[in-house]
Structure formats: C-alpha cells, structure tokens
Image: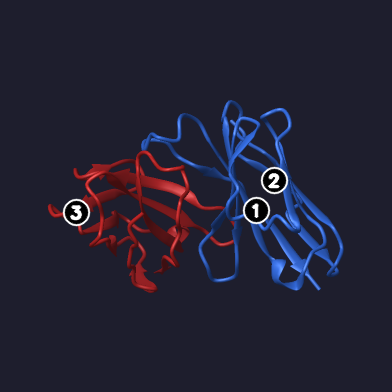
Chain colours: A red, B blue
Amino acid sequence: DAKTTQPPSMDCAEGRAANLPCNHSTISGNEYVYWYRQIHSQGPQYIIHGLKNNETNEMASLIITEDRKSSTLILPHATLRDTAVYYCIVRVASNTGKLIFGQGTTLQVKP
Amino acid sequence: EAGVVQSPRYKIIEKKQPVAFWCNPISGHNTLYWYRQNLGQGPELLIRYENEEAVDDSQLPKDRFSAERLKGVDSTLKIQPAELGDSAVYLCASSFGAVDRADYEQYFGPGTRLTVT
C-alpha cells in the first residue's frame, strides 16, 4: 500500500472550513483514499473514501487531484467536536483489509 | 444499533501477569480485527478474523499473545505473560462484506487501555 504524508498538526477557527491535506504521490491506479479520524479516548471513525472522483457525505468532502497524487479532506463548518487526529490512508480494493495508519494530522478547532 | 463493544475499558496489571480483552462486534459483521495503538502512534493490526478463522495473524507476537473467535461472533485477545512494552490501547474493529471490496467501513470500539507496571 502506498504511503501518505500529512502535516502533524493544524489549527482551525470554529465555524470555518478545515482543509486537511494528504500527499500520496506513489498511489497506484487501484488504490482508494480513505479518511478516518480519532477523537481523544475513542476508536477511529470512518469519514469518507474515494478513488478518483470528488466525494461528499454528511460529514465531509474529499477532493482528489486529477493525477491522484494528493487529496484534501474538507470539513465545511468545523466545530469544537471536530478536534481529533485525522488519518489519510490509501489501500487497494483487493488487499487483506488491513488499514495502515500513519501518524495523522492533529486538528485543533479553536473557539 | 449498538456499536463495537469492548471490555474492560481500562486495565492495570503488573508485568508477568496475564490479561484478557473481550470484543463483541456489530451484529452481522463477519470480519473482526484487533489493533494495538501505542501512545502517539496510529493503530497497527494484530490479527484479522473472517468468521471464526484467523486469516491474518502475521503481526501477532505469538510467543505471548493469543486470540480466539470460537463461534464467529465475539472475540478474546490474551497476553500471557504481559511485559512493560505491552502498555497500549487495544482496539477491536469489525466490518461486513468481502475483504476484496473497498467500499466497506471498519467500525472501531472504544478500546482497552492497558497499563503494565
């Protein structure tokens, strides 16, 4: 599975959009981009995933560049409850199901 | 719908003692995972079950760790004897569907925080 690179930490003002970048320059054509987050003292929570098209759900939007070498997770109106570690993960559809977590980005939403 | 249930939430033991963690996955989920998360790090997979079969235990330290999922539902992870370096959060996750699909989610429990003194 391709490795990802994320900034270790980011701040965001409450109510503003939080844009979390992820580089995955070695991603293969059959690898998906997944985002999970982990709020303090909880297990990771699935947010969204995509292959090549931009995706949106009730939690967030995922923007994937045309060359698929990077992506951005967007939380449109961040709240204090969005403070968490955000993990960007790439994996193929036919692997063993293992999620390989990096160190993620710690997002601090400030009032 | 209940999520993944884990117990206990916290456990403090002395080194060389045994310890066990229990996990009940979401109803109907045939795939169950145990992860270990060290402080400041992302979770790392220890073992994955498809129903009652352990299909990936390559990262499980088999000299002291064991796991079982006898009826393909709940699971137990055991450490015997525990070492200081085993202090971590042990997470259980479950999912539904074939592992060769990308459009499935892993649902995680809250974890068990183990402290070995």
| Side of A13 relative to A28 (left or right) | right
Among the 4 quarters of the image, the one containing residue B70: top right
The amino acid at mark 2 is: Gln
Residue at which label 1 appears: B111
Label 2: which secondary element: strand
Q: Are marks 1 and 3 on the same chain?
A: no
Residue at mark 1 to residue at mark 2: CA–CA distance: 6 Å
Locate the C terminus of chain B by quadrant: bottom right
Question: How far across and how far down the image is residue B29, in percent?
Answer: 56, 30
Chain letter for mark 1, please. Answer: B
Q: Earlier in the sequence, mark 1 or mark 2?
A: 2
Question: How far across and how far down the image is residue A58, in percent?
Answer: 34, 41
From the viewer's side, name the closer residue of B54 and A76: B54
Determine the residue located farthest toward the left in the rendered image: A66
The crowd level at tag 2 (other Cα within 10 Å; few <14, some 14-19, many 20+) is many
Label 1: which secondary element: loop
Residue at which label 3 appears: A68
Are the residues tagged 1 and 2 within 8 Å (C-beta)?
A: yes
Mark 2 or 3, closer to the camera: 3
Q: Are marks 2 and 3 on the same chain?
A: no
The amino acid at mark 1 is: Gly
Chain letter for mark 2, please. Answer: B
Chain letter for mark 3, please. Answer: A
Residue at which label 2 appears: B6
From the viewer's side, name the closer residue of B52 and B90: B52
Residue at mark 1 to residue at mark 3: CA–CA distance: 33 Å
The crowd level at tag 3 (other Cα within 10 Å; few <14, some 14-19, many 20+) is many
Q: Is residue B22 above or below residue B61?
A: above
Q: Is residue A39 above or below residue B28?
A: below
Residue at mark 2 to residue at mark 3: CA–CA distance: 37 Å
Are the residues tagged 2 and 3 within 8 Å (C-beta)?
A: no
